[in-house]
Amino acid sequence: MALRFLGDVCAFHDAEASRAPARRRALMLASLSPTARAQALMTVGLALGPFTFHCSRAGMSLQISGEAPPPPVGWWQYAESVSIAACNATVPACVAVRALKSEWGRCRVTEVELTEDDEVGAVAQEHALDTLRLLRDELHSLTLSNFHIRPTDSVPRLSALRSLSLECCSGAMEKWVTALSFAAERVDICDCFSISAATFADTPAAGLARLVLDNTNVNAPWVEGVSCAASLQTLSLIDCRKIDELDIDAFPKLQRLLLGRTLISNASLAGAEKCGDLRLVNLGGCQRVTDVSALQNLAHLRELFLHETAVTNAGIAALARCARLEKLNLGGCIHVSNVNHLGCLQHLLELHLWSTKVTNAGIHGLSTCCSLVELVLDDCIRVSDVTPLASMPSIRWLSLIGTRVNVAGVKELVHCRTLETLALSGTEIPHPPKLWRQEAVATYLRGLQ
């Protein structure tokens, strides 16, 4: 009944305007029990032109994909949280917010996402700022892209805002940051090049837990000096080309540090041991990093990404002391040829060694990795025999694409009872099949005996 009724509403909304007013009233005033309405919205949702409503345990979501008058919502009431997401439809989203606040007086619009492919026009931006003023005491999360704030624009103080995400925005960025509430927890600013030392100078959010500044023009002294440095748990500076050094110990509570494709060197890692809570470190693409011995005392380190760095065999030797390590990516590290010492990492689940110079002799020690589930050796052209890996008790995914293995080099893998995926394309095995199921892998390997 509930689904049929929502279907009638959609059909009516899409019909021509000449539909009899009596029919309109009958549809709009038709009754659904709150339980039936909630069930319908949580399954198929309700689409009215470019407006799509969907309900979940977290609240009501409204997605807007184009220009249209606001949807009719007065025929039912909703008093919980509402999130709005609009792509290339900033003005319709703002009009919809006002309609919802008018018709659903008790609802709270707690999340707004306004993304545009091109720079937002002046009229649309003024609509957005007016809408934010309407929501200044209830908005928890705000996501914007391609907004340009002029010095004369007035950005309202958003007293409940806890999460701010800006992408490809420009202009007076500090106006957004000063709009944060004292309780703000996360700020993500990506692909924005108007950031300066003044951007965070007056922010009330001194207790931020997450700060993402990927692909921005920030430099190290500015980042180290932010007022929230002592509280940060996540810091991401991926693709920040002005970051050539960083005092990591300025962020004592860090749990996640992402510095991929910056210009930092080994020296910047020296203070890492003072960040005893670090669980994830991403140095992928940092080509000045050759030695990560400074990370050996991080007792809680779980994930380490070193792909496409200049680390050497000696430079990663100390990782054997990272006893809790679960994921390690050394892909593209062309100076790495031997990883036998990693065999002692009893909690290691994933190991990527693609496009390294590891050899048969340089991987046999991995056979003692009792927890290893995924091993990627793609394009390791010095690998021709993986027989020692047949004793790995937990391996489920083994990729040997582009290696020099032949039938003799893989047939002993038949003893890997847990192996579910075996990728052999580009090897010296003629016409290898696609092996994506455990039964298929076992059957194929038995046939090689």
Image: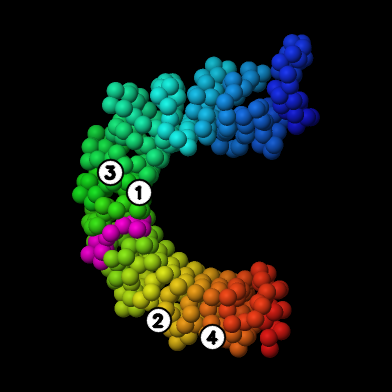
| Numbered tag placed on residue 215 in the rendering | 1
Q: Is residue 265 magenta?
A: yes
151 relative position to 348: left or right: left
Q: Is residue 405 magenta?
A: no
Q: Earlier in the sequence, mark 4 or mark 1?
A: 1
Q: Amino acid at mark 2?
A: Asn
- As rendered, which of 119 and 312 lies closer to the eye? 119
| Numbered tag placed on residue 385 in the rendering | 4
| Numbered tag placed on residue 338 in the rendering | 2
Figure check: 447 above or below 222:
below
Q: Earlier in the sequence, mark 3 or mark 2?
A: 3
Give the structural element (helix, strand or loop) at label 1.
loop
Q: Amino acid at mark 3?
A: Cys
Q: Are discs 3 and 4 less than 8 Å apart at CB?
A: no
Give the image location of residue 334, x and y in percent. 38, 74
Q: Earlier in the sequence, mark 4 or mark 2?
A: 2
Give the image location of residue 193, x and y in percent. 31, 42
- As rendered, which of 217 and 361 lies closer to the eye? 217
Front tag of 3 and 1: 1
> In the image, what residue occupies the spot 68% across and 74% down?
433
Front tag of 3 and 4: 4
Q: Amino acid at mark 4?
A: Asp
